[in-house]
Image (cartoon, grey):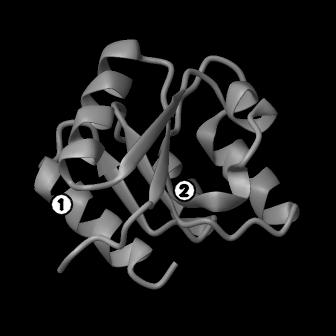
């Protein structure tokens, strides 16, 4: 499946190394990564309406990824969200899935699964 031209993917992760690695992954898959170290920085950025997807860490330093997604939904923003987290626990997974996310991955999961999900959710975005 090919990637439509010009799809921007926001990566919101407070771990600079993880954010950089995700940016490389997204770029290699043919997308344009935009990285943000916090939910607050993401919210302050212009041009959010043109995003194809958000790769969103759940445990951020300020506002959590789940709280960010809930806020976006309340504002009417239906950009697909793929959660990525380093900590697996059932209550977090349940809360994330209740937001209607496109997928939930651990940071140790295969990058190919993340790319496949990105391609799936942006082909109809």
> Is residue 60 left or right of 7 when viewed as pictured?
right
Q: Secondary structure at mark 2?
A: helix
Image quadrant assignment for residue 70? bottom right
Please state which of residues 57 and 32 is positioned toward the viewer in this rendering.
Answer: 32
Alpha-carbon span between mark 2 and mark 1: 18 Å
Tell me whether circle 2 and circle 1 mark residues in contact (CB < 8 Å).
no
Of labels 2 and 1, earlier in sequence is 2
Q: Residue at x 65, y 34 (%)?
A: 64
> Is residue 90 left or right of 69 when viewed as pictured?
left
Image quadrant assignment for residue 62? top right
Q: Position of residue 71 (x, y in %)?
A: 81, 52
Q: Within 10 Å of the Cα at label 2, are there few (<14), some (14-19), or many (20+) other Cα atoms?
A: many
Q: Position of residue 21 (x, y in %)?
A: 25, 28
Quadrant (top left, top right, bottom left, bottom right) of the N terminus: bottom left
> Is residue 38 left or right of 111 when viewed as pictured?
right
Please state which of residues 46 and 25 is positioned toward the viewer in this rendering.
Answer: 46
Q: Within 10 Å of the Cα at label 1, are there few (<14), some (14-19), or many (20+) other Cα atoms?
A: few
Which of the labelled discs sits on residue 113, or is there none? Answer: 1
Q: Residue furthest front?
A: 5
Q: Is residue 43 above or below residue 77?
A: above
Q: Position of residue 48 (x, y in %)?
A: 70, 50
Please state which of the two labelled residues, at mark 2 or mark 1, is closer to the viewer.
1
Q: Position of residue 47 (x, y in %)?
A: 72, 48
Which of the labelled discs sits on residue 96, or is there none? Answer: 2
């Amino acid at each position: 499946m090919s990637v439509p031209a010009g799809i921007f993917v926001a990566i919101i992760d407070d771990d600079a190394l993880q954010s950089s690695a995700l940016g490389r992954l997204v770029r290699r898959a043919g997308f344009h990564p935009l990285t943000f170290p916090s939910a607050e920085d993401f919210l302050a950025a212009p041009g959010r309406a043109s995003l194809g997807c958000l790769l969103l860490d759940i445990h951020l330093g300020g506002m959590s990824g789940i709280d960010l997604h809930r806020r976006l939904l309340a504002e009417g923003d239906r950009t697909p969200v793929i959660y990525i987290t380093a900590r697996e626990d059932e209550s977090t997974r349940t809360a994330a899935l209740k937001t209607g996310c496109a997928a939930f991955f651990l940071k140790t999961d295969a990058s190919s699964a993340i790319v496949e999900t990105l391609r799936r959710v942006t082909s109809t975005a």
